[in-house]
Image: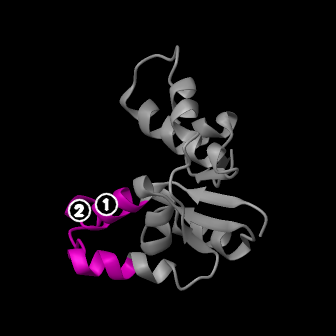
Amino acid sequence: MSSFSFPDINVWLALAAPEHVHAREAACWWEAETDAIGFTRFTQLGFLRLVTTAALMDGKPLTLSGAWRVYDRFYEDDRVAFVPEPREAEGLFRQRTSGRAASPKVWADAWLLAVAEAAGGTLVTFDRALRGRGARCLLQG
């Protein structure tokens, strides 16, 4: 393992929920990944929020303790670590949001990309639009 891969919230969700539309792509990536795999505070909170949301969990949200159990299970894999946001992430975040058109999605994407870059890693996502901004997209096309 030489660097970190940082899955975005939807990749973590697909890894935890076999019924997720991209569960197969996430599982293939997970099985083949040789780098360390990092949770950040942002992805941790987002994951916990989504798995306890009925609309996203097909009407069967996890309880708070159930969400923690699923989250903790990821750490049974030695590749997974919690990575505090590096100090440099703030400056990179500001650079990535300078001069761009305002959009609610820009903020989260820019932060995830900045944290991955500051930590010397790569953001892993299903979002094809982020491919050109330094992320690894798990979807073809």
Q: On the picture, is 60 further left or further right than 81? A: left
Amino acid at the residue labelled 1? Leu
Question: Which residue lies under the disc numbered 1?
Answer: 50
- Indicate the quadrant containing the N terminus: top left, top right, bottom left or bottom right: bottom right
Of 72 and 104, which appears nearest the observer? Answer: 72
The relative height of residue 120 versus residue 66 in the rendered view (above or below) is: above
Of 105 and 116, which appears nearest the observer? Answer: 116
The relative height of residue 78 versus residue 45 in the rendered view (above or below) is: below
- In the rendered structure, are the residues bearing label 2 and label 1 in contact, judged by CB atoms less than 8 Å apart? yes
Q: What residue is at 71 percent from the left and 69 percent from the top?
A: 33
Residue 116 spot, x, y in % from top left:
61, 48
User: Local crowd at mark 2 within 10 Å, few (<14), some, or many (≥20)?
Assistant: some
Q: What residue is at 36 percent from the left and 30 percent from the top?
A: 104
Question: Which residue lies under the disc numbered 2?
Answer: 53
| Residue that lies at the very extreme toward the right in this rendered image | 2
Segment tinted magenta in the rendering: 44-70
